[in-house]
Image: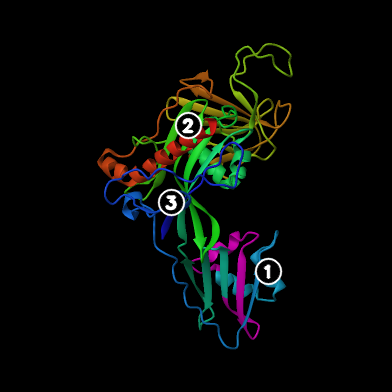
Amino acid sequence: MLLFASGFIPEEPTDHPLTLTTPLPELESGQARNVSGAQGGALLPNAAANGVETRGPASPKEYVVNEDAVVTSETVRAGDSMALIFARRNFSARALYALTQTAHGETLTGIFPGARLTFESKNDQLTALTYEPGPLERVVFSREQDGSFSSEEIFTEPEKVLTYKHGIISSSLFSTSQAIGLPDNLTMRLAQIFQWDIDFVLDIRPGDEFFALVEEQYLDGEFIGFGDILSARFVNQGRTFTAVRYTTENGVSDYFNAQGRSMRKAFLRAPVEFSRISSSFNLRRKHPLYKTVRPHRGIDYAAPPGTPILAAGDGRVEIASRTKPNGNYVVIKHGEQFVTKYLHLSKFARGIKSGKRVNQGQIIGYVGSTGYATGPHLHYEFLVNGVHQNPRTVSLPQAKPVNEQEISRFRERTFENLVLLDHFNQQVALASTSQRS
């Protein structure tokens, strides 16, 4: 079941949610209906209208334990691998090899701390293994009569509850998000939606605010985490940006504005997330090492060593090399017009070399201080037709909008989430006006 709950957090966080004092907007038939007025109301949106899965939790697969079997469980610890765990439990390397040869064997090569493993054995021989990387996923391995293993991946569908979040930034985006109960990974996702229009390193100011319609996920009545951001709005220095999630007919989900234009641009504004600028684009800058006026044709992003560096756009690696002044550096060509350069890397990401095609947001290397660098940072340059431009202010080309053939479908599927966002945005404004009067 998909439900909706509303909450408002003013500049000073409070535990008291906003109580809606006005009815929900009248929507077209089949869009949404008001089913409760308590604490802002609960909505049961039409699943076809917003494209959100509304099935209840899936029934877990029957798993019969052999009467003579011994069943034990453990949680993966830091530094663990399946080889270490099998050695600890005196299971054979041959059994582990057999597990890795199944359809889902690769999942065991990437185990991580916190994941759960349940072993079933008989006469000290492994007969079944269940790997649970999270509360909604299980991979079950079962021994066959010939000694090999089969595998099956089982997903549980959680109950999804829509919740409304609003925050006014006083010091930073992260501190505000934490105050209203949003985890850092969801804050990162919110920032990534708007990263083509807002530089979250330099553009954020006290008084900026954000609004988001977010899924909360529950399993057997217990909150297990946040799902998708269905629609969001960010007000930055008086400029308002609105985004809504939409899944195309081809099954690709992304964010668009209300007119169906992609929130993405052909290039990221900043190739290092949540760093700080230590030196801006300046054609009259005094060089910190040579103490002479030399043009600074890029931007320096100061960040801890090892911070991932992202490709600003789709393209082909033209150079991945090292020189004495540049240290480790990458040059990416994006079509005929655009080139981006990344200098002073500590190291390249795996597979990054000349001729390699890369996608926007792909990790190409890591922050370092190689070459002529006074400290760990990324020097980033953006060229248009061979001329250096300021990456922060250059006009960026748009990504592809919603296909014209499915624009009607887009409007139908996103209408409800945009209307809800508008409605609760208005409620925030009314509450703010009421507090001032």
- The residue beneath circle 1 is 85
Residue 120 at x, y = what percent? 60, 79
Q: Which amino acid does label 1 sit on?
A: Ile
Quick one: label 1 or label 2, which is nearer the N terminus?
1
Name which residue type carries label 3. Gly
Residue 191 on the magenta segment: no
Which residue occupies the foreground of this view, 7 or 103? 7
Query: N-terminal of the two: label 2 or label 3?
Result: 3
Mark sitting on residue 41 = 3
Q: Is 407 positioned to the left or the right of 349 in the image?
A: left
* Image location of residue 392, percent across then percent down: 53, 24
Is 409 displayed left or right of 193 in the figure?
A: left
Location of residue 172 (image quadrant)? top right
> Tag 3's secondary structure?
loop
Q: Is residue 178 left or right of residue 291?
A: left
Which circle, 2 or 3, is nearer the viewer? 3
